[in-house]
Image: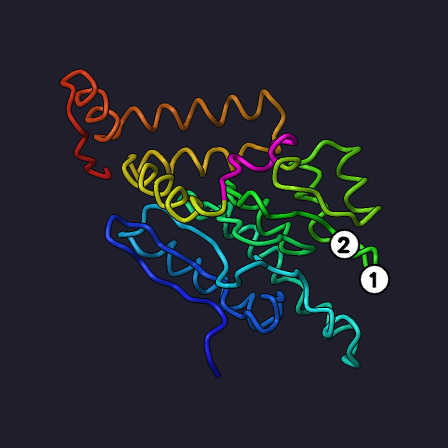
């Protein structure tokens, strides 16, 4: 059986995870989700990786979302329920990865795939791309990903997306704040690489501490979050990288990260 997800690490610490099941429009089957989770675990555990780029090999579709065939097959309900943990496992893994994740939305982002995109730290989109939750049009509701949608999209527009099932353009997504930049199609690959390279130049240690802090405090009350963040800042002050970063800035040179 051929792989459904490609994984490669480039010079400079850029890991690329590519959904590669074009015949199914990268439908989020159990097998594809398992391979995606495994790829992110490889990136998490590889000390050479500094940033992850998630994209698609399909020329027009990032992912069509959940596997509709699996929704309506004859498996017992308990068996279907047991497999649903893949989505929260993937979302949680991306959040706790300790390394920035860029979603390179190089094709339409539909249904469950919208949740995967929103779990990423940064989202770059081709100008031609559309986003949406069309599940309701076939009698399904985006239950699992609604938690991420409500954390990323204003409430009324989130309701519109989930209840109307209509798609929005990349420019509309950018105006709502869940896309960082809309890029002309012809310039997309080069711009994604430029963003990844810029992030890979930062201190991996401070990025890990920062991402972990944000992930841990995002749902806390303000007093709880401030207490936790104060402790993380105190920890950052003990690192060699923070001293090296300040010294490099003063000396007008590139920093040499010690990662400790």
Question: Residue 31, percent across and down?
Answer: 56, 73
Question: Residue 49, percent across and down?
Answer: 31, 51
x 21%, y 30%: residue: 240
Q: Residue furthest bottom?
A: 1
**Residue 103 higher or lower than 231, as above or below:** below
Question: Residue 256, percent across and down?
Answer: 17, 34
Question: Residue 184, percent across and down?
Answer: 49, 41
Bounds of the magenta span? 174-184
Magenta stretch contains residue 134: no
Which labelled disc corresponds to residue 138? 1
Q: Residues within 10 Å of mark 1 (few under 14, many from 20)?
A: few
**Residue 98 higher or lower than 1, as above or below:** above
SS under mark 2: helix
**Of residues 91 and 132, which is closer to you in this image?**
132
CB-based contact (under 8 Å), mark 2 and mark 1: yes
Which residue is label 2 attached to? 134
Q: Is residue 220 visible?
A: yes
Magenta stretch contains residue 179: yes
x 57%, y 57%: residue: 62
Q: Is residue 121 visible?
A: no
Question: Would you identify the image quadrant in which residue 24 lies?
Answer: bottom right
Question: Would you identify the image quadrant in which residue 158 lies?
Answer: top right
């Amino acid at each position: 059986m051929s792989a459904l997800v490609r994984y490669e690490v480039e010079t400079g610490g850029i890991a690329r995870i590519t959904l590669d099941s074009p015949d199914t429009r990268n439908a989020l089957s159990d097998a594809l989700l398992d391979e995606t989770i495994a790829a992110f675990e490889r990136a998490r555990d590889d000390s050479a990786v500094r940033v992850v780029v998630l994209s698609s090999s399909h020329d027009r579709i990032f992912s069509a979302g959940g596997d509709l065939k699996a929704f309506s097959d004859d498996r017992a309900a308990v068996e279907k329920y047991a497999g649903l943990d893949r989505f929260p496992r993937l979302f949680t893994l991306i959040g706790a990865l300790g390394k920035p994740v860029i979603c390179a939305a190089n094709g339409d982002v539909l249904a469950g795939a919208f949740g995967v995109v929103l779990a990423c730290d940064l989202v770059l989109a081709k100008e031609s791309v559309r986003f949406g939750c069309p599940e309701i049009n076939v009698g399904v509701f985006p239950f699992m990903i609604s938690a991420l949608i409500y954390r990323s999209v204003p409430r009324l527009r989130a309701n519109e997306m989930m209840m109307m099932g209509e798609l929005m353009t990349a420019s509309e997504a950018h105006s709502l704040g869940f896309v960082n930049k809309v890029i002309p199609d012809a310039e997309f690959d080069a711009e994604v690489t430029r963003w990844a390279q810029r992030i890979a130049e930062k201190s991996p240690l401070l990025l890990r501490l920062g991402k972990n802090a944000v992930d841990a405090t995002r749902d806390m009350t303000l007093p709880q979050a401030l207490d936790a963040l104060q402790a993380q800042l105190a920890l950052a002050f003990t690192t060699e990288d923070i001293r090296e970063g300040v010294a490099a800035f003063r000396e007008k040179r590139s920093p040499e990260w010690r990662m400790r």
